[in-house]
Amino acid sequence: MKEYKVESLIYYSKLTLDSKHIANDSKKEIQQLLDKYASKGYRLTTSTSTNFGSAIYIHLYFEKDI
């Protein structure tokens, strides 16, 4: 049997010359979530992203055997 968790993150686009600012800004927060769930025995199974207006929504899906 498996246990599942979903984390949702929202990042907003801003006016900048750095076209990768969302990727650069999100790395630290995403790594913290990966470390947090890995320490609890979860593994990242998949991720999705979508945009709406000036926001980007990132969903991380974790699972672990129970």
Image (cartoon, rainbow, N blue to C red):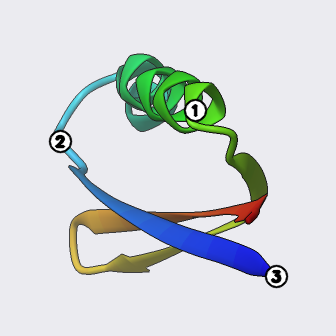
Q: Tell me the kind of residue under disc 2.
A: Lys
Badge 1 is on which residue? Answer: 34
Q: Position of residue 23 (x, y in %)?
A: 50, 32
Q: Is 50 located above or below residue 39 in the figure?
A: below
Q: Classify mark 1: residues with Cα within 10 Å, few (<14), some (14-19) or many (20+).
A: some
Q: Tell me the kind of residue under disc 1.
A: Leu
The residue closer to the viewer here, 23 or 33, is 33
The residue closer to the viewer here, 5 or 41, is 41
The residue closer to the viewer here, 65 or 28, is 65
Q: Residue at x 82, y 82 (%)?
A: 1
Q: Left or right: where does residue 57 sit relative to residue 10?
A: right
Q: Is residue 19 visible?
A: no
Q: Tell me the kind of residue under disc 3.
A: Met
Asked if labels 1 and 2 touch by Cβ distance under 8 angstroms, the answer is no
Q: Is 11 located above or below residue 56 in the figure?
A: above
Q: Left or right: where does residue 14 sit relative to residue 45?
A: left
Does dot 3 land on a helix, a strand or a loop? loop
Residue 18: quarter of image: top left
Find the distance from the CA under tag 1 to the CA under tag 3: 21 Å
Q: Residue at x 17, y 41 (%)?
A: 14
Q: How many marks overall?
A: 3
Q: Is 31 located above or below residue 48 in the figure?
A: above
The residue closer to the viewer here, 15 or 8, is 8
Does dot 1 land on a helix, a strand or a loop? helix
Find the distance from the CA under tag 2 to the CA under tag 1: 26 Å
Q: Position of residue 34 (x, y in %)?
A: 58, 32
The answer to which of marks 2 and 1 sits earlier in the sequence is 2
Badge 2 is on which residue? Answer: 14
